[in-house]
Image: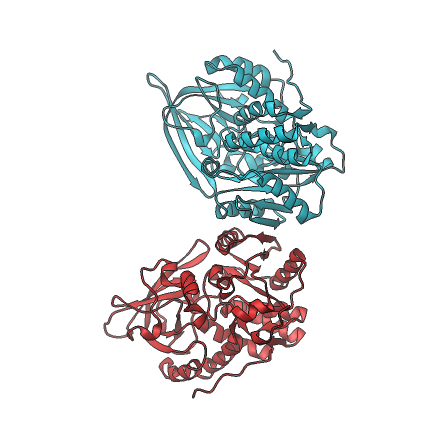
Chain colours: A red, B cyan
Amino acid sequence: MAEDFERLSEIRAEDVADLCLGSVFLATGGGGDPYVNKLLTEAALRTHGPVAMVSPGSLADGAWVLPLGEVGAPTVSLEQLPVGDEPLTALTRYEAATGRTVSHLIPFEVGGANSVLPLVAAAARGLPVVDGDGMGRALPEAQMMTFAIAGVAPTPAVAVDYLGNGVTFDTASVDDYERQVRHLAMAMGGMIFTAEHGMSGAQARDCVVPDTLSFAVALGRLLRSRRGEARALLTELQALFAPSIYGVVRHLYTGKVVDIDRRISGGFDVGEATVAPVQGVGEPLTVAIRNEYLLARSGGRVLASVPDLIIVVDSETCAPINSERLGYGQRVTVIGVGCPPHYRTDAALRVVAPRCFGFDHDYVPLEDLAAG
Amino acid sequence: MAEDFERLSEIRAEDVADLCLGSVFLATGGGGDPYVNKLLTEAALRTHGPVAMVSPGSLADGAWVLPLGEVGAPTVSLEQLPVGDEPLTALTRYEAATGRTVSHLIPFEVGGANSVLPLVAAAARGLPVVDGDGMGRALPEAQMMTFAIAGVAPTPAVAVDYLGNGVTFDTASVDDYERQVRHLAMAMGGMIFTAEHGMSGAQARDCVVPDTLSFAVALGRLLRSRRGEARALLTELQALFAPSIYGVVRHLYTGKVVDIDRRISGGFDVGEATVAPVQGVGEPLTVAIRNEYLLARSGGRVLASVPDLIIVVDSETCAPINSERLGYGQRVTVIGVGCPPHYRTDAALRVVAPRCFGFDHDYVPLEDLAAG
């Protein structure tokens, strides 16, 4: 049962659906709906062939690794479709602005649309991607990336919008950069593409959350093969996650969505979902949202909190549900997963603990909390 | 009485106080308080010598004229002081980002701080400034500059903040650019410096509002020489303005400020001031503010509206009062001045008429409105 997942040496068009499905699970509600970007990525890989994938541990010191993805309120991407050339435009503008030649691309986060966007540019340019990402999940802000926590400078960075407009940043502090890019996302239609936190191979070896793209494909494959009652899936999820960087998987709640309060505020999707028993009575579960699912509470107790992963899956199909897709009446199973060890350091918890999101709770690891 | 004002061939340190005083008058409440920038500019001109000033009509086709100034909520500049090198940093970054050599600098607007900021960079680099600006007054948004109305592209543009952070824009539409730069001002401390709307000498000859820096010096000199009852000043103001591009000067109201509602919203100072008779009763005057004084109403009638100029001066000292300095109890005289003809074209009124600021009024030129 504790057999390890396969590390892939390339991503083929046929892998993209599983990569997206697994990524939406790991995105814990955020990261953007991958549907359109899945189609774009499959088309790019069919046109240009598979994209080579390298382990972060094998990166040469002199490599230059560029994280690439979209920033904004995921809800926007449901209505405003990309042209398709934004990732390549961001890469090209980054190279023009910096004079650097990029050797590898990498996602910000293994989350929804952001897992596959670097593949679109990588395929078009024949570049490899790094098997990993900067979060091992999805989180809403730039300073929460392991790249930033490790001290990689956020800029030079470029942002492009759907209209072909471009902005270049030269900003020392990642907090300043996050505020600038967030305000700019609001000014540029609610969703922009950025290339930022470029780093050497030596830096990347140190801070990339490893193997998460391969893991997402394996996870997507498992989810796809188990369309059925979600509780039965738990054992298999536990077997897949236990030997991984994530570790613990825990069932938090099963019920139906009885209330959802969601709005776009400050460039984020913000809100709260309430899940109650399908039949009978019982304490409801509330899940706080800021793009991602961040805090699950029931009966006055915290069942799981950021930086650990909180995942909402459809109880029938086992498909993970992004926060912008969550709706009244859905039958859902809520699952907690331990976060990668990258987020349990003091330096990381200073930017990703529940208090960083305005919650009045200290972080307690999922495995140390009383079970739901 | 209709003697014309002197066109200056240079700006000396001794002219800066008058330039600032005249500019605050023409800024109609906006443009930022010039106090700190006056000191910075005087110091720069004492260190580097006078800045040469050339008439826009004398610009060669191949000149490259760069508008430079600050963007944001003027209130911020009362509390957050600049380092002093921002104008030069903006110029240097503009040249680095574009590869262009700038031959002349020019203010966005003849208004408060923005009149003198280009002089700081011009003095340090030994560049001349153009005697003119892009508004002939102050107005809150980029698309309202005569440069933009004439079709000059807003970008490449650079923005710098007080921390040395820089952002470069490549945006086709001036409306998109204004939205981006405004959001960025909010993200970068409320006030930023930009260099934008760079243009050839041929373009500048076509769209610069001419001679406004010389005019501001002459106006400042007049205001300074007439510390006393403001009504007595009116005749002299009329004599100075009548032969100029502004034309009509009209007394709108004399009273005291009895209410001021002012907040920072969306990167602007927004609010309304109410002026009532000092003694006795009478219809009060309300002045709507969006950085600048935009609409003066009394008894249900519009007395003056943007793009014409509305100026509030201290009834004792004749000193014009910026909107962020306006306070309860001040004895003030409110004056209307016709706008430069640049703003009475259909193309200009599409972006500067009262409806562009959310007022339910068509523009009626000051001289066609019934007198207060």
Q: For this rendering, which residue is in front, B67 or A185?
A: B67
Question: Is B80 rendered above or below residue A207?
Answer: above
Q: Which residue lies furthest to the top in this view?
A: B1
Q: Residue furthest front?
A: B47
Residue B117 percent coordinates (x, y)? 59, 34
**Where, by quadrant of the figure, is residue B59 drawn?**
top right
Residue at the image point whose x is 59% and y is 62% from the top:
A198
Residue at the image point whose x is 43% and y is 66% from the top:
A325
Residue at the image point whose x is 52% and y is 52% from the top:
A184
Residue at the image point whose x is 45% and y is 77% from the top:
A245
Q: For this rendering, which residue is in front, B126 or A212?
A: B126
Residue B267 percent coordinates (x, y)? 48, 42
Residue A31 percent coordinates (x, y)? 48, 66
Question: Is B97 rendered above or below residue A45?
Answer: above
On the rendered structure, is A261 left or right of B356?
A: left
The C terminus of chain B is located in which quarter?
top left
The N terminus of chain B is located in which quarter?
top right
Please indicate, yes or no, whether residue B270 appears anywhere in the rendered image.
Answer: yes
Question: Is A73 rendered above or below residue B330?
Answer: below
Residue A27 percent coordinates (x, y)? 45, 69
**Where, by quadrant of the figure, is residue B49 drawn?**
top right
Number of numbered discs:
0
On the rendered structure, is B157 left or right of A316?
A: right
Please indicate, yes or no, whether residue B338 appears anywhere in the rendered image.
Answer: no
